[in-house]
């Protein structure tokens, strides 16, 4: 996998875990074990998951529309995205990629490092030679003295991969919400075609 695809896969697994956790919690609260209830749940989730596509093919899920199933689309969106914030996304990538000791994690870190080498901002140290620019970028900006990836570099990577929005990060840091600027915040999946392929559910 390319670095971008591997990062998207990590986040896809995280979203699936969050959805499964919420599903099991609701099933426990309602004492429901019917498989059609699971399809009803996923059919009301807009979270970039392959299960959503399969669930919408089950006509029996519609029987729950007339019942008090405690599955409300708005509530599901709210609960899932409260657990899938930019901070949580960054923490997930740091834990499962940069701090992981599992098989393949070192190879993935090397791919990510190669990604940074070819994604140097055009205006970074323009008077330096190409080699000096690359070394300054990797060792002075992207990593600290312990070669731990800097938060700024992680945010930059996720923004370049269209997983996070730079505007949202800046506004959040300033304590300003898009609504205060007269904009409508979008918290749903950026691209529905990513659902089946394990793509990212962007926070924009």
Image (cartoon, rainbow, N blue to C red):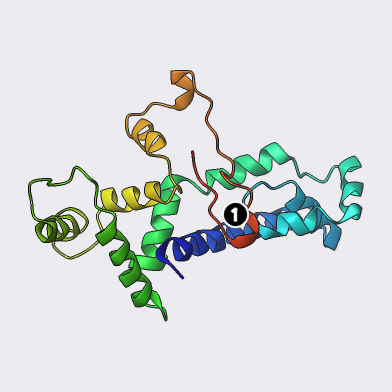
- Horizontal side of 147 relative to 16 (left or right) equals left
Q: Eyeballing the image, is 139 above or below 176?
A: below
User: Residue at horizontal 72%, vertical 40%?
Assistant: 73
Q: Which residue is mark 1?
A: 194
Res 139 quadrant in image: bottom left
Res 65 quadrant in image: top right
User: Residue at horizontal 59%, vertical 56%?
Assistant: 18
Query: x, y (%) of residue 28?
Result: 74, 58
Query: x, y (%) of residue 10?
Result: 49, 64
User: Residue at horizontal 65%, vertical 54%?
Assistant: 22
Query: x, y (%) of residue 144?
Result: 17, 58
- Horizontal side of 87 relative to 76 (left or right) equals left
- Toward the viewer: 128 or 170? 128
User: Residue at horizontal 52%, vertical 30%?
Assistant: 185
Q: Is residue 29 visible?
A: no
Q: Residues within 10 Å of mark 1 (few under 14, many from 20)?
A: some
Q: Is residue 198 visible?
A: yes
- Horizontal side of 197 relative to 123 (left or right) equals right
């Amino acid at each position: 996998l390319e670095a971008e695809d591997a990062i998207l896969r990590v986040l896809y697994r995280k979203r699936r875990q969050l959805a499964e956790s919420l599903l099991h919690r609701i099933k426990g609260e309602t004492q429901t074990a019917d498989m059609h209830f699971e399809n009803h749940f996923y059919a009301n989730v807009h979270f970039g998951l392959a299960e959503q596509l399969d669930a919408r093919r089950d006509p029996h899920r519609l029987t729950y529309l007339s019942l008090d199933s405690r599955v409300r689309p708005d509530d599901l969106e709210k609960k899932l995205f409260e657990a899938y914030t930019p901070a949580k996304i960054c923490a997930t990538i740091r834990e499962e990629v940069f701090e992981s000791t599992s098989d393949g994690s070192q190879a993935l870190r090397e791919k990510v490092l190669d990604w940074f080498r070819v994604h140097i901002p055009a205006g970074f140290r323009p008077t330096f030679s190409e080699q000096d620019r690359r070394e300054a970028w990797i060792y002075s900006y992207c990593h600290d003295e312990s070669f731990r990836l800097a938060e700024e570099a992680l945010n930059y990577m996720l923004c370049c991969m269209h997983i996070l929005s730079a505007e949202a990060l800046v506004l959040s840091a300033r304590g300003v919400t898009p609504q205060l600027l007269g904009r409508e915040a979008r918290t749903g999946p950026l691209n529905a075609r990513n659902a089946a392929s394990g793509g990212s559910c962007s926070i924009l």
